[in-house]
Image (cartoon, helix red, strand yellow):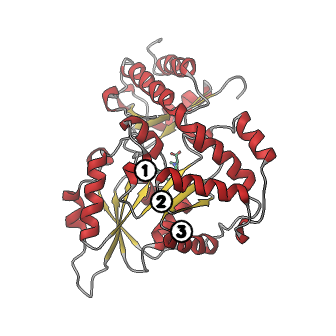
Amino acid sequence: MDGRVIDLRSDTVTRPSLAMRQAMAEAEVGDDVYLEDPTVNRLQSRAAEIFGREAALFVPSGSMGNLTCIMAQTTRGQEVICEAAGHIYNYEMASMSALGGVLPRVVPAKDGILTWEQIGPAIREKAYHKSQTALVALENTHNMAGGTVYPTPLAHEICDRAHEAGLRVHLDGARIFNAAVYLGEKVGDMTKNFDSVQFCLSKGLGAPVGSMIVGSNEFIERCRVIRKMLGGGMRQVGVLAAAGLVALEDGPKLLPTDHENAQNLAQGLAKIPGIQIDPRKVQTNIVIFDVSKTGLTAPKFVERLHKRQVLTGAVDATRVRVVTHRDVNRADCEEAVRIIGEVVGVGY
Ligand code: TLP
């Protein structure tokens, strides 16, 4: 491919901004396995402060962050309740089972948003021949449900009820700042009752690499050991933390634009015959639409768009995902809709 590519595959594809590159070049560094990288330490303190927690830990990826939190809160042979279309169950290489020795117990939920009424019955009764439920894991925003957001009172209720039942609750908050923008709330208030939170610097916030775990001092110390065991102890990683700090401070301010662009894309797509999408359901920066009535399978649709320099992703045989981010603007989104219209043959 040559010429301008409109990359809507994910918000993971952003390139570091000039401010990030400058911060990376100038970063003060040290060996983080000795806790001596001042930039990592600053990033961790700042993340803890923003989330109102005692401590935070920089990890290489969201997947490692989730796995670390799961392993820190379970023992082998236990179960983790999670949503059926959730990331930890579908896109993390079965790591909780392969490496953590725990079993996911999946519960399907409308729009990916679990309620206590759905979670409660999935808890194992206390019987010596049954695996025991240890953890509930929620995802906010929910990626494969199209960036849907948990109402905060619901998240609080799930945490409270789970705690009453003796369970812990983890939040895969890869895109929690998108949820915060949608709700007009603060991430600290939204997540305060979770035992562990993982959020990504490298999604909508635009950093090239990295995620954070936040929690209590004691929890983060356990996570530090597990991170090392997983091979995630890093050395002069302040060069990456420096970009992460810029992402944490500046990234959230850019998210409202991503959400407006996603809404614009959804409305444009809804006008194309054969494409099924309800723009009213698009809350954040992820748009998932059905192409079955265009006569194309989702992989074929994606392939045709690829030839026209528009990159999208097939979710399954009939659904396609597009994600807005800092490196696509309104004109790119409008151009993408125009090209999609042509590709499905309506001469848009
Ligand atoms: N999601 C990626 C793909 O893996 C699907 C994407 O392009 O959206 N939790 C959630 C909710 C995520 O969406 C992702 C990445 C992760 C965790 C994992 O983060 P990384 O890729 O840093 O391991």
Secondary structure of the residue carrying tag 2 is loop
Q: Position of residue 306 (x, y in %)?
A: 59, 30
Q: Quadrant of the N terminus?
A: top right
How many marks do you count on the picture?
3
Which residue lies under the disc numbered 3? 220
Asked if 11 appears above or below 121 in the picture, the reply is: above
- Relative to residue 36, is residue 157 depicted above or below? above
Q: Going by the image, does 202 lie left or right of 319?
A: right
Q: Which residue is mark 2?
A: 53
What residue type is disc 1 on? Gly
Camera-side residue of 234 and 217: 217
Which one is earlier in the sequence, the residue at label 1 or at label 3? 1
* Disc with the residue nearer the chain's start (1 vs 2): 2
- The residue under label 1 is 188
Viewer-side label of 1, 3: 1
State the image coordinates of residue 227 (x, y, percent, origin top left). Answer: 60, 69
Q: Counting other residues with Cα less than 10 Å from the Cα at mark 1, is it few (<14), some (14-19), or many (20 or more)?
A: some
Residue 104 visible in the displayed image: yes
Distance in Å between CA atoms under marks 1 and 2: 8 Å
> Identity of the amino acid at label 2?
Arg
Residue 10 in sight in this render: no
Mark 3 vs mark 2: give the one in front.
2
| Residue at the spot 65% in from the left edge and 42% down from the top edge | 246
**Mark 2 CB near ligand 1 (8 Å cut):** no
Q: Are marks 3 and 2 in contact (CB under 8 Å)?
A: no
Q: Is residue 113 left or right of residue 306?
A: left
Q: CA distance from mark 1 to mark 3?
A: 17 Å
- Residues at discs 1 and 3 in contact (Cβ within 8 Å): no
Looking at marks 3 and 2 on the same chain, the residue that comes earlier in the sequence is marked by 2
For label 3, the SS is: helix
- Asked if the residues shown at circle 1 and circle 2 are in contact, with their CB atoms under 8 angstroms apart, the answer is yes
Image vertical order of residue 246 relative to residue 282, above or below: below
